[in-house]
Amino acid sequence: MKVKKAVIPAAGYGTRFLPVTKAIPKEMLPIVDTPTIEYIVREALESGIKDILIIVSSNKNAIVDHFDRNFELEHMLKEKNKLDELEKITSVTNECNIFFVRQKEQLGLGHAVLCAKEFVGNEPFALLLGDDLYVGEEKPALKQLLEAYDKVETSVVGTLYVDDWDVSKYGICSLKDFRRLPLLELDSLIEKPALEDAPSNLAIGGRYILTPKIFELLETQKRGAGNEIQLTDSINRLLEYEKVYSYEISGRRYDIGSVYGFVDATLDFALKREDIRDRISDLIYKKRG
Ligand code: G1P
Protein backbone atom coordinates (compact mmCIF):
# COMPACT_ATOMS: atom_id res chain seq x y z
CA MET A 1 0.00 0.00 0.00
CA LYS A 2 1.34 3.43 -0.95
CA VAL A 3 2.28 5.88 1.81
CA LYS A 4 0.12 8.99 1.39
CA LYS A 5 0.14 10.61 4.82
CA ALA A 6 2.79 12.15 7.05
CA VAL A 7 2.74 12.98 10.75
CA ILE A 8 4.91 15.61 12.44
CA PRO A 9 4.86 15.74 16.24
CA ALA A 10 5.35 19.32 17.47
CA ALA A 11 3.99 19.17 20.99
CA GLY A 12 7.16 19.06 23.14
CA TYR A 13 8.19 21.78 25.59
CA GLY A 14 11.52 22.63 23.96
CA THR A 15 13.36 22.79 27.29
CA ARG A 16 16.77 22.72 25.57
CA PHE A 17 15.88 26.12 24.09
CA LEU A 18 14.61 28.03 27.10
CA PRO A 19 14.06 30.92 27.63
CA VAL A 20 12.95 31.56 24.00
CA THR A 21 10.60 28.55 23.99
CA LYS A 22 8.67 29.83 27.00
CA ALA A 23 6.31 31.69 24.64
CA ILE A 24 7.51 30.67 21.15
CA PRO A 25 7.21 27.06 19.92
CA LYS A 26 10.68 25.67 19.21
CA GLU A 27 9.38 24.53 15.80
CA MET A 28 8.92 28.22 14.90
CA LEU A 29 12.57 29.15 15.54
CA PRO A 30 13.96 30.25 12.19
CA ILE A 31 16.91 28.79 10.33
CA VAL A 32 17.87 32.04 8.54
CA ASP A 33 14.31 33.26 7.75
CA THR A 34 12.21 30.10 7.65
CA PRO A 35 10.70 28.31 10.67
CA THR A 36 12.28 24.89 11.24
CA ILE A 37 8.92 23.15 10.85
CA GLU A 38 8.53 24.53 7.33
CA TYR A 39 11.70 22.68 6.26
CA ILE A 40 10.19 19.46 7.64
CA VAL A 41 6.88 20.05 5.84
CA ARG A 42 8.79 20.76 2.62
CA GLU A 43 10.72 17.51 3.00
CA ALA A 44 7.40 15.61 3.13
CA LEU A 45 6.15 17.53 0.09
CA GLU A 46 9.36 16.95 -1.88
CA SER A 47 9.02 13.26 -1.04
CA GLY A 48 5.55 13.21 -2.63
CA ILE A 49 3.34 13.42 0.48
CA LYS A 50 0.68 16.12 0.59
CA ASP A 51 -1.55 15.16 3.53
CA ILE A 52 0.29 16.19 6.67
CA LEU A 53 -0.85 16.08 10.29
CA ILE A 54 0.95 18.25 12.83
CA ILE A 55 0.49 17.26 16.47
CA VAL A 56 0.48 20.36 18.64
CA SER A 57 -0.10 21.18 22.30
CA SER A 58 -1.32 24.33 24.00
CA ASN A 59 1.03 27.30 23.46
CA LYS A 60 1.69 26.22 19.85
CA ASN A 61 -0.84 28.43 18.08
CA ALA A 62 1.94 30.18 16.14
CA ILE A 63 2.43 26.91 14.19
CA VAL A 64 -1.26 26.81 13.28
CA ASP A 65 -1.15 30.49 12.23
CA HIS A 66 2.00 29.94 10.17
CA PHE A 67 0.29 27.37 7.95
CA ASP A 68 -2.98 29.31 7.76
CA ARG A 69 -3.82 31.91 5.09
CA ASN A 70 -3.26 35.52 6.11
CA PHE A 71 -5.53 37.36 3.68
CA GLU A 72 -4.68 40.83 4.95
CA LEU A 73 -0.94 40.27 4.48
CA GLU A 74 -1.49 38.59 1.08
CA HIS A 75 -3.63 41.54 -0.04
CA MET A 76 -1.03 44.08 1.07
CA LEU A 77 1.79 42.19 -0.72
CA LYS A 78 -0.30 42.02 -3.93
CA GLU A 79 -1.13 45.74 -3.76
CA LYS A 80 2.56 46.60 -3.40
CA ASN A 81 3.52 44.12 -6.12
CA LYS A 82 5.77 42.21 -3.70
CA LEU A 83 5.21 38.94 -5.53
CA ASP A 84 8.34 37.12 -4.30
CA GLU A 85 7.29 37.76 -0.72
CA LEU A 86 3.74 36.63 -1.55
CA GLU A 87 5.12 33.38 -2.96
CA LYS A 88 7.12 32.86 0.25
CA ILE A 89 4.00 32.91 2.43
CA THR A 90 1.67 30.96 0.14
CA SER A 91 3.72 28.29 -1.65
CA VAL A 92 3.71 25.60 1.04
CA THR A 93 0.09 26.08 2.09
CA ASN A 94 -1.04 25.99 -1.54
CA GLU A 95 0.77 22.75 -2.23
CA CYS A 96 -0.35 20.57 0.70
CA ASN A 97 -3.19 19.85 3.07
CA ILE A 98 -2.13 20.47 6.63
CA PHE A 99 -4.22 19.18 9.52
CA PHE A 100 -3.77 19.66 13.26
CA VAL A 101 -4.57 17.63 16.33
CA ARG A 102 -3.91 18.62 19.92
CA GLN A 103 -2.05 16.37 22.34
CA LYS A 104 -3.71 17.12 25.66
CA GLU A 105 -0.93 15.87 27.94
CA GLN A 106 2.78 15.57 27.13
CA LEU A 107 3.36 11.94 28.04
CA GLY A 108 6.09 11.23 25.48
CA LEU A 109 6.69 10.70 21.77
CA GLY A 110 4.71 7.44 21.69
CA HIS A 111 1.73 9.19 23.23
CA ALA A 112 2.01 12.05 20.70
CA VAL A 113 2.09 9.62 17.76
CA LEU A 114 -1.00 7.84 19.10
CA CYS A 115 -2.88 11.15 18.61
CA ALA A 116 -2.50 10.54 14.83
CA LYS A 117 -4.51 7.28 14.91
CA GLU A 118 -7.76 8.71 13.48
CA PHE A 119 -5.97 10.72 10.78
CA VAL A 120 -3.86 7.78 9.62
CA GLY A 121 -6.53 5.06 9.70
CA ASN A 122 -5.50 1.65 8.43
CA GLU A 123 -2.58 2.72 6.21
CA PRO A 124 1.19 2.89 6.51
CA PHE A 125 2.35 6.44 7.26
CA ALA A 126 5.49 8.56 7.42
CA LEU A 127 6.66 10.13 10.68
CA LEU A 128 9.08 13.07 10.73
CA LEU A 129 10.53 14.43 13.98
CA GLY A 130 11.13 18.15 13.94
CA ASP A 131 14.46 18.11 15.80
CA ASP A 132 16.15 16.25 12.95
CA LEU A 133 16.82 18.35 9.88
CA TYR A 134 18.30 16.60 6.85
CA VAL A 135 19.93 17.88 3.74
CA GLY A 136 19.84 14.82 1.48
CA GLU A 137 22.79 14.22 -0.86
CA GLU A 138 20.55 13.48 -3.82
CA LYS A 139 17.11 12.88 -2.39
CA PRO A 140 15.25 14.08 0.69
CA ALA A 141 15.68 11.76 3.70
CA LEU A 142 12.02 10.80 3.68
CA LYS A 143 12.08 9.96 -0.03
CA GLN A 144 14.97 7.56 0.63
CA LEU A 145 12.89 5.85 3.31
CA LEU A 146 9.82 5.67 1.09
CA GLU A 147 11.88 3.95 -1.60
CA ALA A 148 13.16 1.47 0.99
CA TYR A 149 9.56 0.89 2.11
CA ASP A 150 8.55 0.12 -1.50
CA LYS A 151 11.11 -2.71 -1.48
CA VAL A 152 10.12 -4.35 1.83
CA GLU A 153 6.48 -3.15 2.31
CA THR A 154 6.78 -3.10 6.07
CA SER A 155 7.98 -0.58 8.70
CA VAL A 156 11.32 1.12 8.08
CA VAL A 157 13.23 3.21 10.63
CA GLY A 158 15.65 5.85 9.31
CA THR A 159 19.06 5.59 10.99
CA LEU A 160 22.48 7.20 11.34
CA TYR A 161 25.71 6.25 13.12
CA VAL A 162 26.49 8.31 16.24
CA ASP A 163 29.57 8.69 18.44
CA ASP A 164 29.86 6.76 21.71
CA TRP A 165 29.13 9.84 23.84
CA ASP A 166 25.86 10.42 21.97
CA VAL A 167 24.46 6.87 22.17
CA SER A 168 22.44 7.53 25.34
CA LYS A 169 20.50 10.35 23.60
CA TYR A 170 18.93 8.11 20.95
CA GLY A 171 16.92 5.01 20.22
CA ILE A 172 19.57 2.40 19.32
CA CYS A 173 19.25 -0.51 16.89
CA SER A 174 20.34 -4.09 17.10
CA LEU A 175 20.50 -5.67 13.63
CA LYS A 176 20.07 -9.24 12.46
CA ASP A 177 22.90 -8.77 10.01
CA PHE A 178 26.31 -7.20 10.64
CA ARG A 179 27.09 -6.10 7.11
CA ARG A 180 27.05 -2.34 6.56
CA LEU A 181 24.24 -2.04 4.02
CA PRO A 182 21.71 0.77 4.05
CA LEU A 183 18.65 -1.51 4.34
CA LEU A 184 18.85 -4.24 6.99
CA GLU A 185 16.41 -6.20 9.13
CA LEU A 186 16.14 -5.10 12.76
CA ASP A 187 16.44 -7.48 15.64
CA SER A 188 15.48 -5.12 18.47
CA LEU A 189 15.52 -1.49 19.58
CA ILE A 190 16.35 0.15 22.87
CA GLU A 191 15.58 3.75 23.82
CA LYS A 192 18.39 5.87 25.29
CA PRO A 193 20.60 3.04 26.61
CA ALA A 194 23.77 3.61 28.63
CA LEU A 195 26.78 3.09 26.35
CA GLU A 196 27.61 -0.25 28.01
CA ASP A 197 24.07 -1.55 27.29
CA ALA A 198 23.92 -0.29 23.68
CA PRO A 199 23.98 -3.07 21.06
CA SER A 200 25.52 -0.74 18.46
CA ASN A 201 26.07 2.92 17.50
CA LEU A 202 23.28 2.84 14.94
CA ALA A 203 20.71 5.37 16.12
CA ILE A 204 17.14 6.16 15.11
CA GLY A 205 17.36 9.42 13.18
CA GLY A 206 13.87 10.90 13.44
CA ARG A 207 12.35 9.50 10.23
CA TYR A 208 10.09 6.47 10.11
CA ILE A 209 7.62 4.65 7.87
CA LEU A 210 5.27 2.74 10.15
CA THR A 211 2.46 0.29 9.62
CA PRO A 212 -0.84 1.07 11.43
CA LYS A 213 -0.33 -1.91 13.79
CA ILE A 214 1.86 0.51 15.80
CA PHE A 215 -1.27 2.26 17.16
CA GLU A 216 -2.57 -0.93 18.77
CA LEU A 217 0.78 -1.31 20.53
CA LEU A 218 0.99 2.36 21.54
CA GLU A 219 -2.41 2.06 23.20
CA THR A 220 -1.03 -0.43 25.71
CA GLN A 221 2.53 0.91 25.88
CA LYS A 222 3.92 1.22 29.42
CA ARG A 223 6.19 4.13 30.28
CA GLY A 224 9.86 3.62 29.51
CA ALA A 225 13.01 5.78 29.45
CA GLY A 226 12.51 9.15 31.18
CA ASN A 227 9.16 7.82 32.51
CA GLU A 228 7.65 8.62 29.09
CA ILE A 229 5.58 6.55 26.65
CA GLN A 230 8.30 5.78 24.12
CA LEU A 231 7.65 5.09 20.43
CA THR A 232 10.85 3.02 20.31
CA ASP A 233 9.41 0.57 22.88
CA SER A 234 6.31 0.01 20.71
CA ILE A 235 8.41 -0.49 17.56
CA ASN A 236 10.41 -3.04 19.53
CA ARG A 237 7.14 -4.86 20.33
CA LEU A 238 6.06 -4.51 16.67
CA LEU A 239 8.98 -6.82 15.84
CA GLU A 240 7.04 -9.67 17.49
CA TYR A 241 4.36 -9.34 14.79
CA GLU A 242 6.12 -8.17 11.62
CA LYS A 243 9.53 -7.45 10.18
CA VAL A 244 10.95 -3.97 10.72
CA TYR A 245 13.93 -2.65 8.75
CA SER A 246 16.51 0.02 9.39
CA TYR A 247 17.61 2.27 6.55
CA GLU A 248 20.78 4.35 6.89
CA ILE A 249 19.89 7.79 5.58
CA SER A 250 22.48 9.43 3.35
CA GLY A 251 22.99 13.16 3.69
CA ARG A 252 23.83 15.70 6.36
CA ARG A 253 21.75 15.70 9.52
CA TYR A 254 21.49 18.55 12.00
CA ASP A 255 20.16 18.08 15.54
CA ILE A 256 18.32 21.39 15.57
CA GLY A 257 16.84 20.57 18.98
CA SER A 258 20.27 21.41 20.42
CA VAL A 259 21.75 24.91 20.45
CA TYR A 260 24.95 23.68 18.75
CA GLY A 261 23.08 21.86 15.94
CA PHE A 262 20.79 24.84 15.47
CA VAL A 263 23.67 27.30 15.04
CA ASP A 264 25.48 24.81 12.76
CA ALA A 265 22.38 24.56 10.54
CA THR A 266 21.89 28.33 10.57
CA LEU A 267 25.45 28.94 9.37
CA ASP A 268 25.33 26.22 6.69
CA PHE A 269 21.96 27.36 5.37
CA ALA A 270 23.10 31.00 5.34
CA LEU A 271 26.26 30.01 3.45
CA LYS A 272 24.10 28.28 0.82
CA ARG A 273 22.02 31.39 0.19
CA GLU A 274 23.31 33.28 -2.84
CA ASP A 275 21.99 36.63 -1.59
CA ILE A 276 23.98 36.60 1.67
CA ARG A 277 26.67 33.90 1.23
CA ASP A 278 29.66 36.16 0.56
CA ARG A 279 28.92 38.62 3.32
CA ILE A 280 28.34 35.87 5.86
CA SER A 281 31.59 34.11 5.02
CA ASP A 282 33.47 37.45 5.27
CA LEU A 283 31.85 37.99 8.63
CA ILE A 284 32.90 34.57 9.95
CA TYR A 285 36.42 35.09 8.63
CA LYS A 286 36.73 38.54 10.28
CA LYS A 287 35.40 37.26 13.62
CA ARG A 288 37.86 34.36 13.69
CA GLY A 289 40.75 36.57 12.66
C1 G1P B 1 13.47 10.76 19.81
C2 G1P B 1 13.31 9.24 19.79
C3 G1P B 1 14.67 8.57 19.64
C4 G1P B 1 15.37 9.10 18.41
C5 G1P B 1 15.48 10.63 18.46
C6 G1P B 1 16.03 11.19 17.16
O1 G1P B 1 14.15 11.12 21.01
O2 G1P B 1 12.67 8.83 20.98
O3 G1P B 1 14.50 7.18 19.53
O4 G1P B 1 16.65 8.51 18.30
O5 G1P B 1 14.19 11.22 18.68
O6 G1P B 1 16.20 12.56 17.23
P1 G1P B 1 14.15 12.64 21.58
O7 G1P B 1 15.20 13.37 20.82
O8 G1P B 1 12.78 13.19 21.35
O9 G1P B 1 14.49 12.50 23.02
Image (cartoon, rainbow, N blue to C red):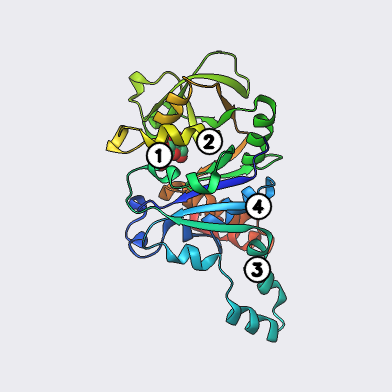
In the displayed structure, 73 sits above or below 196; it is below
In the displayed structure, 165 sits above or below 253; it is above
Q: Earlier in the sequence, mark 3 or mark 1?
A: 3
Q: What's the residue at 53%, 50% (across, down)?
A: 265
Disc 3 secondary structure class:
helix
Nearer the camera: disc 2 or disc 1: 2
Q: Earlier in the sequence, mark 4 or mark 2?
A: 4
Tell me the tag on residue 90.
3
Rounded to the nearest angstrom, the CA distance separating label 3 from label 4 is: 15 Å
Side of 177 relative to 219 (left or right)? right
Alpha-carbon neighbours of circle 2 within 10 Å: few (<14), some, or many (≥20)? some
Nearer the camera: disc 4 or disc 2: 2
Nearer the observer, 46 or 103: 103
Q: Earlier in the sequence, mark 4 or mark 1?
A: 4
Tell me the tag on residue 212.
2
Side of 82 relative to 69 (left or right)? right
Residue type pointed to by label 4: Lys
Q: What's the residue at 64%, 83% (across, down)?
A: 75
Q: Marks 1 and 3: in contact by CB < 8 Å? A: no
Q: What's the residue at 32%, 44% (across, down)?
A: 107
Residue type pointed to by label 3: Thr
Which residue is identified by label 4?
50
Rounded to the nearest angstrom, the CA distance separating label 2 from label 1 is: 13 Å
Which residue is identified by label 1?
110
Alpha-carbon neighbours of circle 4 within 10 Å: few (<14), some, or many (≥20)? some
Cβ of disc 4 within 8 Å of ligand 1? no
Residue type pointed to by label 2: Pro
Residue found at the far bottom of this picture: 79
